[in-house]
């Protein structure tokens, strides 16, 4: 029950805060421009699904390479720690 109340309060606070911020003219213009750009981009991707797939493949490839690189670095670090511990324990 407490978790539901907390999450509900956070959502309500965010909605109220967003609504209050729209009283500012610059904020309304920004939200309007952002909404228009998002709609244009969504429309473009609906008309060009192959580009979405290509972009997604590239992103997945980049993320995979980053994970592989970080994993290799972590393994090398662990190997060095193991080697150092082995030398210290032998003495």
Image: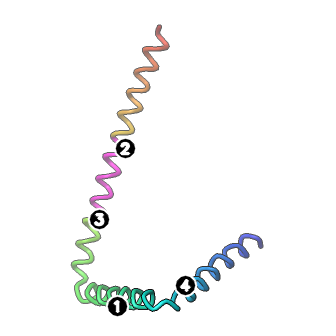
The Cα atoms of the two marked residues, 4 and 3, are separated by 31 Å
**Few, some or many C-alpha atoms within 10 Å of disc 2 (few <14, some 14-19, many ≥20)?**
few
Name which quarter of the figure residue 83 lies in. Answer: top left
Q: Give the residues in magenta.
A: 59-72
The Cα atoms of the two marked residues, 2 and 4, are separated by 41 Å
Write down the residue under mark 4.
18
Look at the numbered discs 2 and 1 and tell me whether their residues touch, using CB distance below 8 Å: no
Name which quarter of the figure residue 56 lies in. Answer: bottom left
Look at the numbered discs 2 and 4 and tell me whether their residues touch, using CB distance below 8 Å: no
Q: Residue 77 in the image: state x and y as whole percent.
A: 38, 33
Q: Residue 82 in the image: state x and y as whole percent.
A: 43, 25
**Few, some or many C-alpha atoms within 10 Å of disc 4 (few <14, some 14-19, many ≥20)?**
few
Q: Determine the residue located farthest toward the right in the rendered image.
A: 1
Sequence-wise, the earlier of marks 4 and 3 is: 4
Name which quarter of the figure residue 20 lies in. Answer: bottom right
Sequence-wise, the earlier of marks 4 and 1 is: 4
**Res 71 label:** 2
Write down the residue under mark 1.
36
The Cα atoms of the two marked residues, 2 and 1, are separated by 41 Å
Write down the residue under mark 3.
59
Q: Which of marks 4 and 1 is in front?
A: 4
């Amino acid at each position: 029950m407490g978790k539901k109340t907390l999450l509900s309060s956070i959502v309500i606070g965010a909605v109220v805060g967003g609504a209050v911020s729209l009283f500012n003219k610059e904020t309304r213009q920004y939200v309007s421009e952002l909404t228009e750009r998002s709609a244009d981009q969504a429309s473009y991707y609906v008309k060009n699904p192959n580009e979405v797939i290509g972009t997604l493949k590239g992103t997945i490839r980049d993320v995979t390479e980053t994970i592989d690189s970080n994993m290799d670095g972590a393994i090398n670090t662990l190997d060095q720690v193991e080697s150092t511990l082995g030398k210290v324990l032998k003495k």
